[in-house]
Image (cartoon, rainbow, N blue to C red):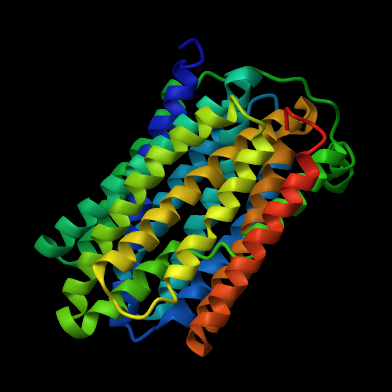
Amino acid sequence: MKWLNSTVLGIGVASLFSDVGHEMATVAMPALLASLGAGSAMLGIIEGTADGLSSFAKLLSGHYSDRLEKRKFLAVIGYFVTASGMASFAFATQAWHVFLGRVFGWLGRGARTPVKNTLLTEATTPETYGRAFGLERAMDSAGAVIGPLLSAVILAQFGIRSVFILTLIPGTLAALMIWFLVKEKPHQINGKRPLFSGFKLFPTRYKMFLGGVGIAGLGDFSNTLLILWATQAWSQEYGIAKAASIATLFYAGYNVVYTIFCAVAGKIADIFPKYKVLAFGYVLAVIPALTLLVPGSSFLKFGVIFGFSGMYMGFWETVESSSAASLLPAEVRGLGFGALASINGIGDLISSALVGVLWMVSPALAMLWVIVTSLLGASLIVRAGKDDVHA
């Protein structure tokens, strides 16, 4: 596997450690908010705002990184900032404290994302983009399996505040992996063009691709809402603490499925047209949305919801990134990845807040929104890629 070099491995291991840390915090966050008297609307607003502001950090970081001969240090700083934001939850006594910590951490995550994707692209070849990004996503999601399990153990033994403090350890290790393992190649700098003039260099097909991603992303609500809904569904029978622990285990199962399908989707995307593989992933999102409307709170129901959610996200995140790598010219690669991340972040800003509020009004209306945006996004991706078998 010639594509599996020090840089690809370093980015993958960094993603694993970072996700261990912020998933430890993420799965404990709904229980913390519940103890502070906050519900799904507040959680949706926190997640949506953090993702939305993070999207602007991704855009600016991507643009700025294209103007630097070396940009690895931006990723290192981003990993440290994310770790600090998650650890700050340990000191939260009101919901707005969680809000500030999440926003701060996600700004760091935003700053590192386009840089990480650009470094990964430049360390491999177009023929293996799918496998390289599939490995990175799989390592990331492996961390998301380990993180919730660690969170559940620490929560049971030491309490919820200890979970957040201990996230500093894997978060710091992630930054060190980037610093020591990633070998960056200096790239040519073609002047210091203004931010928006760089958009003109995007291929038309990439602009159409971003449109499809944006529409689908309007229904891509945060997985913390799934954890909250599962916790609420089981709290009457098991109590909130045990219900939260069970929901955490289901979320760990979600990440097992996600890990598997990141690798599967990456391999498939190196064989078949990427636009078809991505459109298929968007259509898969309909299954958990419909299942959420089935009456009852059985483990089987939520098993289907978490399982298919992990499956479709494996396709979404892997194939979106590898498609972008295939479509972007080198001189605006950082900006292009920043734009992709920003489009997703804006979608998260709208979807998490909107779905969280709609759910309180009518679950059917919330899931109808998810279904329509997923199918419309799939249709736009097909339209963008149907004339190019390599898209």
| Left or right of residue 59: residue 247 | left
Q: Residue at x 24, y 58 (%)?
A: 249
Residue 227: percent from left, percent from top: 35, 68
Outermost residue on the left side: it is 157
* Vertical comparison of 365 with 187: above or below: below
Residue 82: percent from left, percent from top: 45, 51
| Left or right of residue 326: residue 387 | right
Q: Residue at x 21, y 61 (%)?
A: 162
- Who is closer to the viewer here, 364 or 168? 364
Within the image, what quadrant is residue 333 found in? top right
- Who is closer to the viewer here, 133 or 18? 133
* Vertical comparison of 342 with 173: above or below: below
* Vertical comparison of 366 with 375: above or below: below
Camera sees residue 18: no
| Left or right of residue 69: residue 353 | left
Residue 336: percent from left, percent from top: 73, 40
Q: Residue at x 52, y 87 (%)?
A: 362
| Left or right of residue 389: residue 313 | left
- Who is closer to the viewer here, 27 or 229? 229
Q: Quadrant of the C terminus?
A: top right
Within the image, what quadrant is residue 370 found in? bottom right
Outermost residue on the top side: it is 2
* Vertical comparison of 373 with 196: above or below: below
Q: Residue at x 37, y 75 (%)?
A: 229
Camera sees residue 339: yes
Residue 108: percent from left, percent from top: 52, 50
Q: Quadrant of the N terminus?
A: top left
Q: How many marks?
A: 0
